[in-house]
Image (cartoon, rainbow, N blue to C red):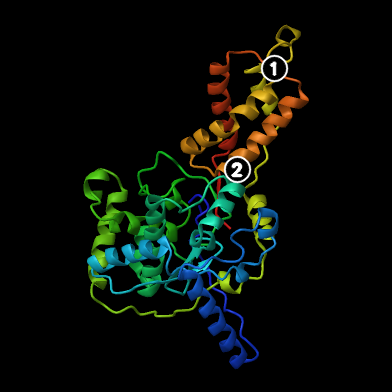
Amino acid sequence: MPARGSKSHRPATRPPRAKNAKKKATKRNATRQSSKRSAGGKAHRWESLPDHRLLDTRLRDLNLRIEGTPMEARIERVYEELDARGIRVRPHTWLSTEWFSPDGIPGVGVPFYLAHPRLVKLERDKMFEVEGASLAECMRILRHEMGHAVCTAYRLHRKPSFRKVFGSYSKPYPESYRPNPSSRAFVLHLDWWYAQAHPAEDFAETFAVWLKPGSKWRTQYKGWPALKKLEYMDELMKGIRDKAPLVRSKATVEAASRDSITLRKYYARKQAFYSQETGDVLEKDLHRIFSNDPAFRRNLSAAAFLRAERAHIRRTVADWTGQFQYTIDQVLSDIIERSRQLNLRLALSEEEARVHAMLMVAVHTLSSLKHRISL
């Protein structure tokens, strides 16, 4: 997310002002020079550190930049898509702790870890996946976030027609939402039916589907109420074609270059956010697959079986549900611990147990069909 952990819109906060402008400028120049050296191919000093030492590094001390990374080419690609549609705004980008576009600023924050392969590896080790690492996923997220930025740049959310089509932009953001997977009133773009989270997300998701080159949205959404939103988007974008943006702020919010949080604390917060408890109903479900009957005492323990299948179950359930692998792994941890406490052993063949275990984990992960808005 965002979408699976993809934080998209929130009130902007003013960057802290330096007490000494000259001192701030000197520091900024020094950082810029350091970043240029890094982008030029020289290794960062922290690249070779083991995880336990790297985790004590502050984000600001990573000296990261987008220039010279694969992310730069991906951003340029979405700029070309905007140009091809006659949208004359190039939302600026900066490295932050997550994907988002702040209210009032037509720009996009990009997760810092996408700026370096060592940090991509750390993210995967800690969270089991890297949101935006693949080209396809990254472009989906970028198109979504650019939708927010374009909305801000042209103040489209202030139009009465916006409210009529998407709902109230000023509606408070929920901490979580319950999507209706069968609804055809929303486009399908990012995971977890993210367009249903908030009117602002509905707009951004619709924009992303509209923007994608070669998108056959008229055919794909024929007969869906969501088609009216796409047709509205098409007319709305024609109205701003070749027009200069109304909002041109280049401010950055929660930039990694100013963030004093350590990687250790960052991941502690992120892991806590995506953790999820399972209920006591587990015991009944576990006994459908495993047993503590003495007749099965020579069979493999449920805990050992689940640990061996853990990675496969986690990936498969993530594909089924669209949930974060970290969240699923927390559910698995609870299931493994509970099966150990109950001294359960396999009561089915391993093949049958594997299928039933995946279904059980999926059900418990989606028990409330409730998805949290990203940090």
Q: Relative to residue 289, is residue 254 depicted above or below?
A: below
Question: Residue 354: horizontal and vertical position, in percent?
Answer: 56, 22
**Which residue is depicted at the point 38% across and 52% down?**
135
Q: Relative to residue 289, is residue 232 depicted above or below?
A: below
For the residue labelled by badge 1, is the local secondary structure a helix, a strand or a loop?
Answer: strand
> Residue 359's image quarter?
top right
> Residue 71's image quarter?
bottom left
Question: Residue 156: horizontal and vertical position, in percent?
Answer: 36, 70
The residue carrying mark 1 is: 345
Which numbered marker is on residue 327?
A: 2
Relative side of 93 to 16, left or right: left
Say whether marks 1 and 2 touch (CB < 8 Å): no
Which numbered marker is on residue 288?
A: none
**Which residue is depicted at the point 44% across and 63% down?**
168
**Can residue 160 be spotted in the picture?**
yes
> Residue 237's image quarter?
bottom left
**Can residue 254 be spotted in the picture?**
no
Relative side of 120 to 61, left or right: left
**Residue 173 or residue 293, whichever sits in front:** 293
Question: Residue 98: horizontal and vertical position, in percent?
Answer: 53, 61
Question: Residue 60: horizontal and vertical position, in percent?
Answer: 61, 71
Q: Which of labels 1 and 2 is toward the front? A: 1
Packing grade of label 2 (10 A; few <14, some 14-19, many >=20) is: many
For the residue labelled by badge 2, is the local secondary structure a helix, a strand or a loop?
Answer: helix
Amino acid type, mark 1: Arg
**Which residue is depicted at the point 27% across and 70% down?**
87
**Which residue is depicted at the point 54% across and 17% down?**
352
Amino acid type, mark 2: Thr
Q: Split into 4 quadrants, where in the image is the C terminus?
A: bottom right
> Which residue in the rendered view is the most extreme toward the front?
42
Q: Relative to residue 275, is residue 67 depicted above or below?
A: below
